[in-house]
Every structure is written in structure tokens, then in C-alpha cells.
Image (cartoon, grey):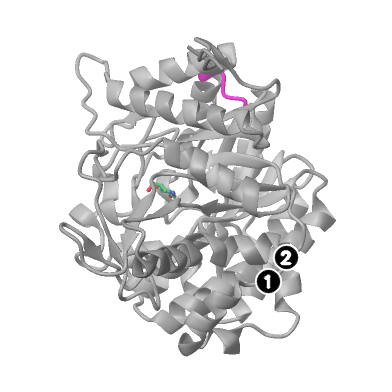
Amino acid sequence: MSAQPIPDVLAFPDAFVWGAATAAFQVEGSTTSDGRETSVWDTFAARPGAVAGGDTGDPAADHYRRYADDVALMRSLGLTAYRFSLSWPRILPYGTPEPRGIEFYDRLVDRLLAAGIQPWATLYHWDLPQSLEDRGGWTARDTAYRFAEYAETIAARLGDRVASWSTLNEPWCAAMLGYGSGVHAPGRTSPEGAVAATHHLLLGHGLAMDVLRQHASTPSGITLNLYPVVADTPDDADADAVRRIDGLQNRLFLDPLLRGGYPADLREDLSRFGFDAVVRDGDEAVLGKPIDWLGVNYYRGYRVAGSARPGSTPAGREWPGADQVHFVPDLAAPRTDSDWEVHPSGLTASLLQVHRDYPPVPLYVTENGAAYPDTLRDGEVSDDDRIAFLDAHLRAAHDALAHGVDLRGYFYWSLLDNFEWAEGYAKRFGLVHVDYHTQQRTLKRSARWYAEVIARNALG
Ligand code: IFM
């Protein structure tokens, strides 16, 4: 049989959603305006050495004040959706609704709708109010209930207009980096804390799903950062390393959300960190409330081994119970400015993993993107590296479609250059370059390239 020719033009399905994403703390700035409470990220960034360059949430991209201009930029690119997050400390500081914070999102949503852009709102992208962290943060079960209260406050107000809701963004990061390795806020380093935070975040998700069902008729889901994990060799020890890392990164979240319970092997691995004690009878039914879609954030894959290999890095504290695992670098792969290997086929692999191993659920790539050392010269940012990244990953997304994956949209991370957490402002992920001194926006070459893809609904 002759091989099928690869078509020059790869068309995406009708109504495919083309978006770009941001998150409140990363773009808004104005961290002390309009009654906003301090978040864990404000506190963490103030800690010497926690964030590169001593950067903080100000000025970010000043999106809180410039959102209308930013919506005009989105419109000029032809985006059909904008994925942003809502700031809990602006909306419900110290547990009391703050009209000025709520009105900001009201205006943003209305502005998007007027521009013909679907508002995709995420309830939690890591900016926990500090007063809740002071009461235990996500290690405390009560935070899940406070999260549902917050969801109710904002869904009651925006439920009639938000096109799609997400409860959490990347709970793995919030739990494991925030409470395990401590490289993210609140900067705690306890495996027990990381495990408790994982469960309480997911419990909060389930409780918030109920709230969203009451206040919104539009689809609701959750966003996970999934990584395809492969073994360095066929050894049993390497296979066990895959089991552990795939378990902690992917199955620990996918199974309770889509299959009604935590995987038995992980329950066993994590029992020494008190997992069984935090998961109460009946909780898994709450975690498994039906979702309308699943968001997949994809950046890279992992090659793992059960012992040290040349150039490998041992698993850190963000991998509770996986102390023997080593991450093996792919020296041949190109790297982004974050030093992440570029593996476009890993996007197809992650989407296929969900498609193959779980009950059917519509999928969206809710984040995918890369930092590169962009320079603004004569009013231009010639980021051909980012165009190559985008092109390769969109081809990988298309490949997933060709394999029957129910993929409904793609969001580039990020619309704007922004605060890249512990890396501060040094890493630029945006389609739009931001001069942090003047706040001038400049469309990068990749933005124009992406706009052409959107206009044609096709690559090539
Ligand atoms: O900037 C982050 C975002 O907040 C969550 N996903 C990964 C991005 C790049 O690191």
C-alpha cells in the first residue's frame, strides 16, 4: 500500500476555538488597587531570592488598567476566545465581596463580548488570598469550601455571560510546587502538605462544579498540565519510574476527575504522606462530578529512569515518593529560553493518552507556548523560533484530530509577555511584546503569523 501524501494545507474543524491565555497575577498589576487583598504570590515575591530579579506582581502588563486596549489587540488578531483568570483576592478579599474588583471582570467580559470574543474564565490560577494561607492554605480542607463560596460570588455575577468556566488551572503546580518543592508560592516544602493540597484543590474543584451548574448554563471544566512520560530503557526500574511520574503528574488528577477515584497504586505510594487520612468517604464522588470539557496544558514531555544516567537530574521534592526517579535529558532536542526541550509530538501523545485511557470528554489545548529571548528592534520582534514552535505544535494538534481525538480548540500561552512566576519578567512567552517601563505593546511576528492561521482556520 502506498503511503498517504501529507496534505499541504491542514484545515481545522469548523467552529474550532482559537484563543490566547493569560492569568490574573501574571498580567494585571495594580496589586494594591480597589480593595484587593494580598495574595500568596505577593507575599512570596517579597521574600528575598524567591523570584528572579526580585520581580513582583507590579507592574506586570498593567492589564487591570489597559484591558480595553488589550481586547482591541485580540480583536485585531481575530482571536475567537480569551482565556483569563479571575483574582480571588480582588473579588472576595478577606471573605467579603469587593464590588470594585467584581466590576473589573464585569467590564472585561462585556468588552470581550462586544468584540465578538468568547470570555473563558478560570476561577483559580494560583493567587490564593493570604488570609486563607494563614489558616493553612490548601493543606486545610476548609479552603475547598471557601473556594466554593468564592466561585458562587463570581458565578452569580458573570454566569450569564462567561462562555466557558474552568475551576482550576494546573492543580499539580499549585500543590507540588507550592507545598512540595516550595519554588512557587506559598513556598512550603512538605510532602504531606503537597499531598493534602492536591486533594483539597480537587475537592474545591468538585464543590465549585456544583456551584457553576447552579449559576451558569455554559460549559464548565478544569485545566491540567499533562506530560507524556517515557522510559529511558525497557528495564523494570525505568518502567516503575514511568508509573510513578505519570502517576503523580497525570493519573493522580485524571483518574479522580474522569474515572471516579484515585489510582490504587498512588494511594499506596502516597499513604505514607497521609493521603488516606485526607481523602474522606464520599470525597471521590465530589471530585468526579461530570465535566463538560478538559483543558490540556502542554509544554514538554519527560524521559525517566529508575537510577542515575549520564546528565540526569534526580526527582525533587515536587515528586513525593519518587525519590529514586531520575529525569534524563534529550540532548538532541532544541530548547526554549526556559530550558525546556521542544517535543511537539508530545502534545499528540498527551491528547491521545486522555482519548485512549478515559471516557470521552471534549478536549481543548488550553495552554501551549514558549519563552524565547525576544528583542525589540526598530519596532519589530522577529520571533521566528516561536513561529516554528507554534507551527510544529499546531501540526501535532492536527495529528491528534486525525487520530480521532475530540479536540475543540487551541489557546496560545500567552497573549502578552508577563510575570513568569519564579522567573519574574525575564522569560517572555507573549505573542505581544510588552515594554515593562512604558507598557507599550508590539505585536511580534508570531502574532501576525497566528492571526493568519486563525483567518484561514488552517495551517500551511
Ligand atoms: O506561565 C505559566 C502559566 O501560568 C501556567 N502554565 C505554564 C505557563 C508557562 O510556564
Give the SS element for disc 2.
Answer: loop
* Residue at image point 34% right, 78% down: 189
Could you say which is closer to the camera, residue 440 or residue 428? 428
Q: What quarter of the picture does the N terminus occupy?
A: top right
Question: Marks 1 and 2, Cα distance to the nearest angstrom?
Answer: 7 Å
Whether residue 424 appears in magenta in the rendering, the answer is: no
Q: Which quadrant holds residue 242? A: bottom left
* Residue at image point 56% right, 80% down: 267
Asked whether the beta carbons under mark 1 and mark 2 sit within 8 Å of each other, the answer is: yes
Q: Position of residue 217 (x, y in %)?
A: 83, 46
Q: Main secondary structure of the magenta part?
A: loop
Side (left or right) of 398 relative to 53: right
Q: Residues within 10 Å of mark 1 (few under 14, many from 20)?
A: some
Q: Using the image, determine if residue 438 lies above or below residue 209.
A: above
Q: Position of residue 18 (x, y in %)?
A: 58, 27
User: Residue under circle 2?
Assistant: 288
Label 1 is placed on what type of residue? Gly
Q: Which residues are magenta?
A: 76-80
* Residue at image point 56% right, 60% down: 88
* Residue at image point 35% right, 37% down: 370
Q: Residue furthest front?
A: 1
Q: Is residue 229 visible in this depiction of the protein? A: yes
Q: Which quadrant holds residue 383? A: top left
Q: Position of residue 24 (x, y in %)?
A: 49, 49
Of label 1 and label 2, which has the lower sequence position? Answer: 1
Could you say which is closer to the camera, residue 242 or residue 380? 242
Q: Using the image, determine if residue 208 lies above or below residue 303.
A: below
User: Residue under circle 1?
Assistant: 261
Q: Residues within 10 Å of mark 2 (few under 14, many from 20)?
A: many
